[in-house]
Structure formats: C-alpha cells, structure tokens
C-alpha cells in the first residue's frame, strides 16, 4: 500500500506529523514559560513578599503573555496573522482561554496543594502547570490560532478527490 493509492491516508499522516511537531514546539515554549512563571513566582513571593495566591496569578499572567508571543512566532508560524488587529484578537483569545485555564487551574490547585495540604509552593506550581498544559494546547490549536484556510481547503480537496 502506498500513499498515492490512498490520498486521504497520506493527508492524515502528514496532519498527524504536523500535529506532533506542533505539540513538541508547544511544549518547548511551555517549558520556557514554566521557567518564566517559576522565576516570577519566586521573585514575587520570596523577594517581594507577596502572598502566594496573588503572586501565582501575576506569575501566570506573565507566562501567558510570554507564551503567546512565542506561539505566534514559532509554534503556529504557519498560521500568521493577516493584520495587527488579528494578532491582538488572538492575544485576547489566548488570554481568555489559555490564561483562564492556567490562572483558574493554577490558583485552585495551589489553594488545595499549598493551602490545604501544606505542600511546597514551587512543587505545587509545577504540578498545576502540567495538569493545565493539554487543555491549553487544544484551545490554542483549535480556538486561538485556528486552522490555516489553505490547509483546510487542501485537505477537503484531497478527501473529495478520493471519493470520485
């Protein structure tokens, strides 16, 4: 069986490879974002003596903005904004979706892990970050950056061509 006999399978295989590459890029950016968030949390909580909950919220927002900038220019570089207002709209969508998942998830998990169970602040934050990452990838890929119009039409064309 070769891919020319089954163009839909070939297209799906390339879509899977693209999604895996994107997932790897997403996690690379996320890893940098984790470092940014943990550094911000450490500075805000340890040096500036801000309570762990507001410090967590501020650290998350700093990381969310950092991650958006990298995702737009690296992870979803193949889906560029057509104009500056589209990029601003994406930032708002990213902040509302990924930011909300990260902020609410992190603050709630921190409240439980640190406030209820007395766990370490930084270790608890790492656990919260990991738990929120899959949801954030799906929201970014489907909602924030959407599918590039030319990819959607090319896939539909492959599919329709295979039905003839």
Image (cartoon, rainbow, N blue to C red):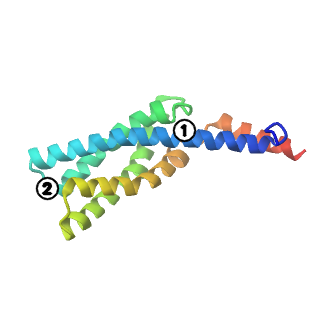
Q: Residue at x 49, y 46 (%)?
A: 140
Q: Is residue 55 above or below residue 36?
A: below
Residue 69: image quadrant is top left
As rendered, which of 144 and 19 lies closer to the eye? 19
The quadrant in which the N terminus is found is top right
**Label 1: few (<14), some (14–19) or many (≥20) C-alpha neighbours in 10 Å:** few
In the image, residue 35 lies at what x, y percent?
28, 41
The quadrant in which the C terminus is found is top right
Which residue position holds label 2?
51
Which residue position holds label 1?
21
Helix, strand or loop at mark 1: helix
Label located before the other in sequence (1 or 2): 1
Cα gap from disc 1 to disc 2, whole angstroms: 38 Å
As rendered, which of 25 and 95 lies closer to the eye? 25
Residue 39: image quadrant is top left
Q: Is residue 80 above or below residue 45?
A: above
Is 13 on the left-hand or right-hand side of 113? Answer: right
In the image, residue 42 lies at what x, y percent?
17, 46
Residue 107: image quadrant is bottom left
Q: Is residue 14 above or below residue 45?
A: above
In the image, residue 133 lies at what x, y percent?
42, 52
In the image, residue 82 lies at what x, y percent?
54, 29
As rendered, which of 67 and 144 lies closer to the eye? 67
Please say whether residue 103 is visible from this viewpoint: no
Outermost residue to the right: 164
């Amino acid at each position: 069986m070769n891919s020319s006999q089954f163009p839909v399978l070939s297209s799906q295989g390339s879509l899977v490879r693209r999604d895996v590459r994107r997932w790897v890029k997403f996690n690379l950016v996320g890893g940098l974002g984790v470092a940014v968030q943990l550094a911000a949390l450490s500075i805000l909580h340890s040096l500036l003596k801000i309570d762990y909950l507001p410090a967590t919220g501020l650290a998350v927002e700093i990381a969310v903005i950092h991650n958006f900038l990298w995702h737009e220019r690296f992870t979803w570089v193949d889906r560029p904004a057509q104009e500056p207002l589209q990029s601003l709209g994406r930032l708002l969508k990213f902040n509302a979706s990924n930011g909300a998942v990260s902020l609410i998830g992190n603050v709630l998990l921190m409240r439980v892990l640190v406030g209820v169970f007395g766990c370490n602040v930084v270790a608890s934050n790492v656990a919260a970050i990991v738990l929120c990452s899959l949801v954030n990838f799906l929201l970014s890929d489907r909602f924030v950056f959407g599918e590039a119009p030319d990819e959607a039409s090319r896939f539909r064309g492959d599919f329709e061509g295979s039905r003839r």
